[in-house]
Image: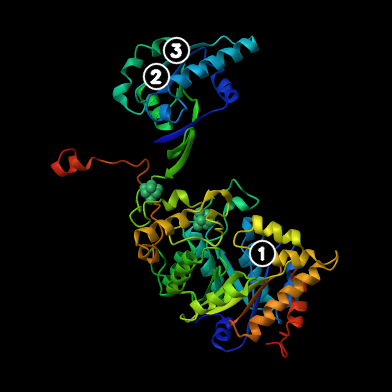
């Protein structure tokens, strides 16, 4: 049995909302805990990122345990960048034993984009192999074929890039992730709804849930920076222009407005099963976004 | 070929400091082709060392030079036998394999690396070499249209591109092609995209036996060397 409450919600017709929290660089968890308390009843699940952008931080599993302790529903992020198959399996055993029910399976950004550029990149597995490995563990053996005393069970997610400039190879990978056991996808940030609609048409043939990735941009410079430095992000010029068009001090508000506009359209057109909000360091504004997008839970779960 | 790169002069000077009489030893094969340790580079390096020594005024190394056909092959090392009697160390400008064969052949002779062995690769244009193979021991070029996913994808992943690829380039650099986009295009051109749709399981990274050893297949087939 999975520990996942999120899995049940995936099977409902509810419009789902997930968000993510970046853990601290250091042992001081107070801000992360504040963010958890702020968001846990307002969203259906909270991802805790795993050394996002290859920047060393407090681990995802540590954050997920805090989410559990505080009564929220965590999504553990696992990348293949830093751990080999032994370490990842061990972490999954720990996660399951401590009641964590959801795992987002990622290959991970290159070491080179982060703050430890000389570290050894592991990539013993890729995202597709990671998904399969977890399904193998669920069947009772580790990936080496050895029997497990107690098998885990997870609700598995993965990532997809609907706005990639060259979509065909990404769709092949998407298919492979589904065949490997992905049940839900949290997409890379989307901006261009035309390409997102095309992706959704393609994805409709599969029995998987798609949560559209919504990133909140705080400035035109941040958008430019992300375009140049953050893998998998492509902010269109029109959005950058829109951010530049407002006076200083109101740019974040504009970023929120853009996010809300996207969310509302997605919801009105019933484009996909939910959204995944990435506030990158500004977790505090997520409730405002939910309110503006009329996604406030009437009675918290 | 095995591509190496000359070490910085300052590092070489620090290394040779304890030794009076040095033989700078070139290799006539890969190190020559990649411009790191052929006859020409041996002579350039010795000139540079002599100039530096003259400037510093307090060093008195005696530098000789020689280039063998291939340092990694014992059969080409015999001419060195008469030379090693007159020297205190060999400054080798071959790949790390060549240096080790020299060290095994001359157990009493210190061997100093004058180059950094960098990768296995091919010439892109004059003076530019690109990595092409990591000797993974399980060549999958048939599945990837002749383009190596281990060396041409930064992450060496096997089941298709990550989400970081943009404009056909890798997420780490606008100057580096994304290996998986190259593979996709090549397979598409060959009408073999189904190869990319297949699932490829995790690689076998088993390192034992280390060092690895290969016994000639021909000998196994005829029963020789097969005890
Ligand atoms: S797959 Fe790549 S690294 Fe492996 S043997 Fe072939 S070319 Fe070399
Ligand atoms: S962008 Fe391409 S080459 Fe770079 S890590 Fe991703 S798949 Fe590999």
Q: Residue at x 52, y 19 (%)?
A: B45
Q: Which residue is mark 1?
A: A235
Quadrant containing the C terminus of chain A in the rendered view: bottom right
Dot 1: chain letter: A
* Residue A44 in picture, x, y percent from top left: 64, 81
Task: Say if mark 2 contacts mark 1, CB within 8 Å.
Answer: no
Q: CA distance from mark 3 to mark 2?
A: 15 Å
**Secondary structure under the numbered disc 3 in the rendered image:** loop
Residue in the picture at 54% in, 76% down: A198
Position of residue A298 relative to residue A92, above or below, is: below
Discs 3 and 2 carry the same chain letter? yes
For this view, does B102 lie left or right of residue A245?
left
- Which residue is outermost to the left? B222
The residue tagged 3 is B87
Residue wearing tag 2: B67
The quarter holding residue A32 reads: bottom right
Please name which of the two marks, 2 or 1, marks the residue nearer to the observer. Answer: 1
Foreground of the two, B35 or A183: B35
In the image, residue B171 sits, relative to residue A195, either above or below, namely above
Q: Is residue B16 above or below residue A72?
A: above
Q: Considering only order in the chain, which callout, 2 or 3, is on the residue closer to the N terminus? A: 2
- In the foreground, B186 or B94: B186
Where residue A217 sits: x, y (%)?
Answer: 73, 66
Number of other residues with Cα within 10 Å of mark 2, as a class: few under 14, some 14 to 19, many 20 or more: many
Q: Chain of mark 2?
A: B
Picture residue at 78% right of the left edge, 78% below the top = A288
Compute the Cα span from label 3 to label 1. Answer: 64 Å
Label 3 C-beta lies within 8 Å of the nearest ligand 1 atom: no
Question: Residue A260: which numbered mark, if any?
Answer: none
What chain does mark 3 sit on? B
Are the residues under marks 2 and 1 on the same chain?
A: no
């Amino acid at each position: 049995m999975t520990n996942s409450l999120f899995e049940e919600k995936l099977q409902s017709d509810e419009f789902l909302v997930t968000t993510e929290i970046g853990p601290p660089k250091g042992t001081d968890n107070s801000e992360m805990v504040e963010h958890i308390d702020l968001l846990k009843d307002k969203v259906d699940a909270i991802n805790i990122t795993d050394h996002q952008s290859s920047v060393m931080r407090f681990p995802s599993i540590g954050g997920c345990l805090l989410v559990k302790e505080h009564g929220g529903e965590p999504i553990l992020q696992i990348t293949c960048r830093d751990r080999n198959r032994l370490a990842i399996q061990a972490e999954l055993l720990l996660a399951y034993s401590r009641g964590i029910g959801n795992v987002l399976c990622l290959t991970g950004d290159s070491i080179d984009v982060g703050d430890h550029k000389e570290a050894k990149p592991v990539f013993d597995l890729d995202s597709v192999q990671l998904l399969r490995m977890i399904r193998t563990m669920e069947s009772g053996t580790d990936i080496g074929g050895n029997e497990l005393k107690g098998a885990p069970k997870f609700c598995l997610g993965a990532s997809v890039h609907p706005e990639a400039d060259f979509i065909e190879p990404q769709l092949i990978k998407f298919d492979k992730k589904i065949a490997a056991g992905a049940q839900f996808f949290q997409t890379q940030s989307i901006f261009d709804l035309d390409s997102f609609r095309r992706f959704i048409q393609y994805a409709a043939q599969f029995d998987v849930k798609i949560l559209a990735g919504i990133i909140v941009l705080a400035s035109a410079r941040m958008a430019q920076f992300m375009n140049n430095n953050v893998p998998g992000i492509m902010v269109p010029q029109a959005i950058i222009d829109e951010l530049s068009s407002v006076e200083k001090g109101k740019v974040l508000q504009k970023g929120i407005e853009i996010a809300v506009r996207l969310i509302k359209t997605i919801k009105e057109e019933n484009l996909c099963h939910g959204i995944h909000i990435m506030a990158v360091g500004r977790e505090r504004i997520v409730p405002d976004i939910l309110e503006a997008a009329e996604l406030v839970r009437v009675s918290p779960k | 070929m095995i591509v190496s790169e000359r070490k910085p002069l300052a590092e070489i000077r620090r290394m040779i400091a304890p030794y009076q009489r040095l033989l700078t030893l070139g290799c006539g094969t890969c190190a020559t082709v990649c411009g790191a340790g052929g006859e020409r580079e041996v002579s350039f390096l010795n000139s540079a060392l002599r100039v530096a020594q003259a400037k510093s005024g307090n060093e008195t190394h005696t530098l000789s030079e020689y280039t063998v056909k291939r340092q990694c092959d014992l059969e080409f090392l015999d001419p060195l036998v008469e030379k090693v009697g007159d020297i205190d160390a060999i400054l080798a400008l071959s790949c790390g394999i060549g240096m080790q064969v020299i060290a095994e052949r001359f157990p009493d002779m210190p061997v100093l690396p004058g180059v950094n062995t960098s990768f296995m690769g091919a010439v892109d244009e004059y003076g530019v070499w690109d990595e092409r193979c990591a000797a993974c021991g399980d060549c999958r070029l048939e599945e990837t249209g002749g383009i190596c996913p281990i060396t041409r994808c930064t992450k060496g992943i096997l089941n298709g591109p990550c989400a970081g690829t943009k404009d056909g380039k890798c997420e780490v650099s606008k100057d580096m092609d994304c290996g998986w986009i190259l593979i996709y295009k090549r397979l598409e051109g060959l009408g073999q995209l189904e190869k990319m749709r297949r699932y490829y399981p995790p690689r076998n990274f088993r390192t034992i036996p280390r060092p690895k050893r290969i016994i000639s297949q021909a000998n196994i087939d005829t029963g020789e060397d097969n005890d």
